[in-house]
Image (tube, coloured by chain):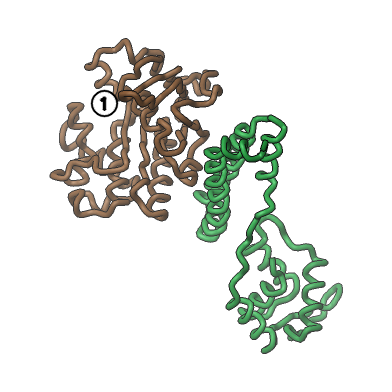
Chain colours: A brown, B green
Amino acid sequence: MNDRGVPLLVGRDLHKSYGPTAALDGASIHVRAGEIVAVMGPSGSGKSTLLHCAAGIVPPDSGRISYDGRELNAMSDVERSALRRREFGFVFQFGQLVPELTCLENVALPLRLDGVKRREAERRAAGWLDRLEVADIAHQRPGEVSGGQGQRVAVARALVNRPRVLFADEPTGALDSLNGERVMRLLTQAARESDTAVVLVTHETRVAAYSDREVVVRDGRTRDAELVA
Amino acid sequence: MSIGQAFLGLLESQPRHGYDLKRAYDERFGQGRPLHYGQVYATLSRLLKNGLVEVDSVEPGDGPERKRYAITAAGVTDVERWLGQPEKPDLHLQNTLYMKVVLALLTGRGAADILDSQRSEHLRLMRELTRRKTDGDLADQLICDYGLFHLEADLRWLELTAARLDDLAGKVRR
């Protein structure tokens, strides 16, 4: 168990450009074990790019990212992808569920990919659907459920293999207020119970209020406080 | 806050003693700021004088007599009129934060820092309300949501002002 005081994930002085456009211009972030951090900022400020870099999805042009003392830049693609599969979970705004599978099979999928037997994977998946209050739609396909239910299934799938960090990019962006609140309540509750840290990208302050603290990104930069770690 | 009308509404649902009225008010609307007994009895005597409530019964007790109050027909009309009348939206146009931003720009101080620290303070309060809402019942949720939406509006203003600081600085220093 990582000490609460020592950051689990650190990104330092990250730069990333897409063509002539600088998405990150020296941004930094640190996340402690079990901590819920909101990444906020106006549209186009670089908050999603910061999440993608910190999660090892997109390599930064320069800057360093370390997870539990290991440098992401020094890892091979295979190692990084294993890290993402085993230690990280992801929830995005839209469409991350496999439409051909039932909700239960969707949640069991990460476990099946990790070699867990079908019966055991589905037993654990059913437990997560229950925690996210969507046990009743276990055998329906994503196209047959509401947006809010689908997003709760996505949260269950992201947490089923007990990641140490959950990356959530605008997880309530496509939902109305009431469904958005429900997703956030259940997501943060489940993350806290599993001691999973959350990096939550959002432009909605009411969503950010579920976090422990915020990192504000403006023009690809963050405040110096993020460098302290 | 219209304590008088709140009392009338509570009395319309059932007659109550002064103490019960205070307790019902504090439970539903007090939000950690209970009424003083002075306020309760001053309000009741005003409602009595205006014929909006009446003393329904008097019970002897160890100390002073306990009066039970009931709403009158005039009281019911009054509360009905009040409920049907929209509240004037609160407009905080004389805003301390705006004043701080302008003065910071005028004196060459960092207005962005003022907005940043205000954002943190607003978010701190929003977190507190969110926690209270998550742990609370439906009444807590509605009350906290009211506060959260207002704080959110302030934060939107903070963001927009932060994005317009350069323009504002140009105008203020002219």
Looking at the image, residue B112 lies above or below residue B87: above
Q: Examine the rendering and report whether any part of residue B57 can be seen.
A: no
Furthest residue toward bottom: B73
* Residue A15, x across and y down, in percent: 40, 19
Q: Quadrant of residue A59?
A: top left
Which residue corresponds to the image point at 34% horizontal and 45% vertical from the top-left? A131
Furthest residue toward front: B174
Furthest residue toward top: A74
Q: Examine the rendering and report whether any part of residue B12 can be seen.
A: yes
Task: Depth check: give the residue in front, A38 or A88.
Answer: A38
Q: Chain letter for mark 1, please.
A: A
Task: Depth check: give the residue in front, A219 or B148.
Answer: A219
Q: Quadrant of residue B124?
A: top right
Which residue corresponds to the image point at 32% horizontal and 27% vertical from the top-left? A88
Count of numbered circles in the view: 1
Task: Depth check: give the residue in front, A61 or B75.
Answer: A61
* Residue A148, x across and y down, in percent: 32, 51
Which residue bears the numbered disc 1?
A: A85
Task: Depth check: give the residue in front, A65 or B41.
Answer: A65
Which residue corresponds to the image point at 40% horizontal and 34% vertical from the top-left? A194
Could you tell whether A137 is left or right of A204 in the image? left
Could you tell whether A102 is left or right of B72 in the image? left
